[in-house]
Structures are given as C-alpha cells and as structure tokens.
Amino acid sequence: MRKKFEGVLSLKQKVSLIFLAVFLLCLCSPVFAEETNPTLDQLGIVATNAGLVSKSPTALIGSIIKWVLGFMGVVLAIMIIYGGILWMSAGGNAEQISKARNTITNGIIGLIIVFAAYSIAHFVIEGLQTEILK
C-alpha cells in the first residue's frame, strides 16, 4: 500500500523549488532605515562617482557601441556553442549535422563581423576624441 504523500513532488520539481527558494532569498536584503534627504547635490555626487557626468558625448556613444557589440559577441559565442551541442547530439543524422554546421559557420561569420565593427568603432571614436581634445 502506498503512503499518502509519497512521490508528491518529482526530483525535477524539488530541484526547481530549491532553486526558486534560493533565488528569492537572494533578492531579499535587510533594510536599514535611515532618514536621508536626497537632493540634487547628492544625486550629482552619485552620478560623478558612477562616471556618468565626466564623459564627453563621443565617449558616451563609444561606450554604448562597445557594450552593444560586446553583447552581440556573447550571443554569437552562445550560438557557436549551441551548434556544437547540435552536432554532438546529431547521432549521425546528416540533416542535423548540416544544421549544426550552418549554425557554427553563421556564428563564426557573425563574430568576425562584430570584431571588425568593434575595431572600426574603436579607431573612429579614438580619432574623434583626440581631434576634439586638440
């Protein structure tokens, strides 16, 4: 005879529940109540410490371009890894191997384009900054 609550949650559900609980506990942080008076001066100090105020427009645009290209590089690297996983799990299936090969090829071509765009953007932005500073 089976127990009433035996096997209520599968192992996958238990692991998912544990990860969810740990994630939610990490989001909770203690609150230390303190009376503050946020003024524009304090916000200016925070912005200066974060490096938001001291950047010129070309430096700001350059950093945005570099972040976007960096993110695209990460996405393309994940695409190459995904293609490798497809290839390894193909099991001799020619159609899946072809799909994996195309995914890897497209990822490599994309990475080459991103690296070229990054180097061109870096060259142009550095040139603009030195011309503006003269």
Image (spheres, rainbow, N blue to C red):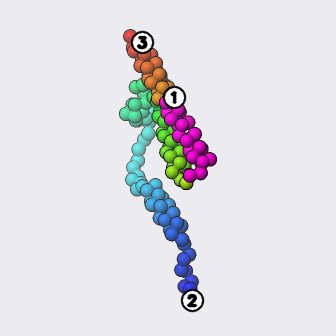
Q: Is residue 110 magenta?
A: yes
Which residue position holds label 2?
Answer: 1
Foreground residue, 89 or 111?
89
Which residue position holds label 3?
Answer: 131
For badge 2, the amino acid type reads: Met
The overriding secondary structure of the stretch rendered in magenta is helix
Report the magenta residues as a range.
92-112
Q: Earlier in the sequence, mark 3 or mark 2?
A: 2
Which residue position holds label 1?
Answer: 113
Q: Secondary structure at mark 2?
A: loop
Q: Is residue 72 visible?
A: no
Quadrant into which the C terminus falls = top left
Between the C-alphas of marks 1 and 2, the distance is 65 Å
Q: Earlier in the sequence, mark 1 or mark 2?
A: 2
Residue depth check, mark 3 versus mark 2: number of the one nearer the observer? 2
For badge 1, the amino acid type reads: Ile
